[in-house]
Amino acid sequence: MGVMMAERLIAVLTPLRRPRVFLTTVIALGVVGAALTYVVLLNPGGTIMRLFRSVPPERFGTITIGPYPQEEDFPRLKQEGVKYIVTLLDPRLPYEKPMLERELALGAKYGITVKSFPLFPMDSMLKTEFFSGSLEEEKKAVEFLAHADGRAYVHCYLGRHRALRVRDALLKAGVSERSFTPSELDNVLSAAYEAFRRKDYPRVLSLLEPMTVRDVEVAHRRGWAYYHLGRIEEAAKTFREGLEGQPMHPRLLLGSGYCYLRSGEPVMAQREFGAVLEQIPGNRDALVGIGLAHLSLGNKAEAARLFRKVLEAYPDSREVKEYLRSAERR
């Protein structure tokens, strides 16, 4: 019996020793293996990849690091007040390209802006640059996050090497550790955010009264609460005190610019809005603000041009349409 089994095994293996058959078998196995790997990699939330990816965050700070977000994660990101998803996926990788496209579509669906800064994975793991452009993209990501005008969720594929490399670069750039660490202040700010969304501005001020105005989030929310209540001098003072700590922060510059507009100082407003556009080209609120400043100065043609530019990107904005009608009136 043993001799017969040995003979059969030899009969099966013998053809594989022939170069062509062996090579074909190896190629076929390689193709099947590559296809299976591709399918697995396309699903980072699957059973296999879940063993390797970082744990999705339970609490959110100003900047939150995590793994690739699945569709079921988007409602929670929206609920947590995340304005930007900063993706480090690299479309040069066959499995990351469709993931990035899916993410962009989900961002549009849920009203979250997806900003792409592609980093090649091996560059972060080995701290080198296999593909030109990775280091430049990392710098752009750091610059954007350091001045982002809202909460950001930063991720790569697993939420480990690339995302953590950007976090370390942000810390070196002077971004506070507190930006990444949820605290009791974040709970207060979340409550203030909800009150602001309901337009309950007195409640916003009540919640933030014990908090230091030098925190960017506090200054931003408190300043706009004063602004919407018509208390422009207090709003301007709040934004400017916040800017003492971070002189070029775009959210505070926007608030200060609109206070200058309401106070009849359009030239000063243009300066603030211009500083925002230097950091975030195409920022909608800054373009509208400069347009309103031109309108106030009597430069109707330039104001109309800016309002049309905004409407190209946001065609459903009734407010900007009204501004454009004002600019086109003789």
Image (cartoon, rainbow, N blue to C red):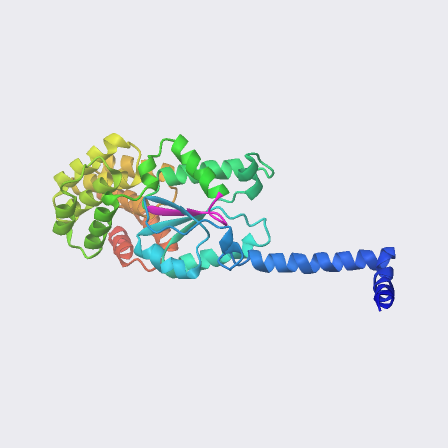
Between 324 and 270, the residue placed more toward the observer is 270
User: On the rendered structure, is 71 left or right of 239?
Assistant: right
| Quadrant of residue 321 within the rendered picture | bottom left
Please report the residue visible at 84 percent of the width from the left and 69 percent of the height from the top.
1
Q: Is residue 299 visible?
A: no
Residue situated furthest front in the rendering: 1
Estimate the x, y position of residue 114 in percent, counting from the top left.
42, 51
Between 52 and 161, the residue placed more toward the observer is 52
> Compared to 309, does 40 lie above or below?
below
Between 209 and 323, the residue placed more toward the observer is 209
> Compared to 47, does 251 lie above or below?
above
Please report the residue visible at 34 percent of the width from the left and 48 percent of the height from the top.
305
> Compared to 94, does 295 lie above or below?
above
Q: Which residues are magenta?
A: 151-160
Is 255 within the magenta?
A: no
Please report the residue visible at 85 percent of the width from the left and 67 percent of the height from the top.
8
Estimate the x, y position of residue 209 in percent, counting from the top left.
13, 42
Estimate the x, y position of residue 292 in percent, counting from the top left.
25, 45
Q: Is residue 223 visible?
A: yes
Number of marks in picture? 0
